[in-house]
Each structure stands twice: as structure tokens, then as C-alpha cells.
Image: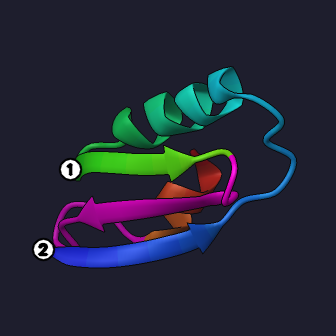
Amino acid sequence: MDTLTLKLRGMSCASSATRNEEAIQSVPGEREPSVKNVAEHATVNYDKQKKDLKTILEA
């Protein structure tokens, strides 16, 4: 399992963080992403064998 921290911009409320978290979770191989709207970042734990960085960013 690999961990990735992504900088996100434009999240103004908790619902923005929730939408981003749900989008990341929808990608196969994702394990419990954590999106923080105040810090504007997401911590993503994923299996490199099941998905790549491009897939995460597209979500």
C-alpha cells in the first residue's frame, strides 16, 4: 500500500471535501482517503497494482 498527499484548491466547505473524498473512493484500489478542506489536501492510501496516479487525479 502506498500513501500519497495531494494539494487541493478551491474547497470552501466540508461538503467540498466530502465530494472530493467520494470521488477518490470511487476509484478501484482506493483505501479510505482523507480530505481536509481547511488544509486543502487529501491523503490517499492506494494499491499501485490496481490504479495509478493519473486515475486518482482524474477522479
Residue 50 x/y as whole percent: 20, 61
Residue visible at 20% across and 50% down in the picture = 31
* Contact (Cβ within 8 Å) of mark 1 with mark 2: yes
Q: Quadrant of the C terminus?
A: top right
Please name the colour scheme applied to the rendered image: rainbow
Residue visible at 56% across and 49% down in the picture = 36
Q: Earlier in the sequence, mark 1 or mark 2?
A: 2
Residue 30 x/y as whole percent: 26, 50
Residue type highlighted by circle 1? Arg
Residue 53 x/y as whole percent: 47, 72
Compared with 44, 19 (above or below) is: above
Residue 35 x/y as whole percent: 51, 48
Residue 41, image quadrant: bottom right
Residue 51, image quadrant: bottom left
**Main structural element of the magenta stretch: helix, strand or loop?**
loop
Q: With 49 as the anchor, is 22 left or right in this view?
A: right
- Local crowd size for mark 2, using a 10 Å CA cut-off: few (<14), some (14–19), many (≥20): few
Residue visible at 54% across and 27% down in the picture = 18
Residue position marked by numbered label 2 in the rendering: 1
Q: Quadrant of the N terminus?
A: bottom left
Compared with 16, 49 (above or below) is: below
Highlighted range, magenta: 38-52
Compared with 55, 32 (above or below) is: above
Image disc number at residue 31: 1
Residue type highlighted by circle 2? Met
Query: Magenta segment: does it hold 5?
Result: no
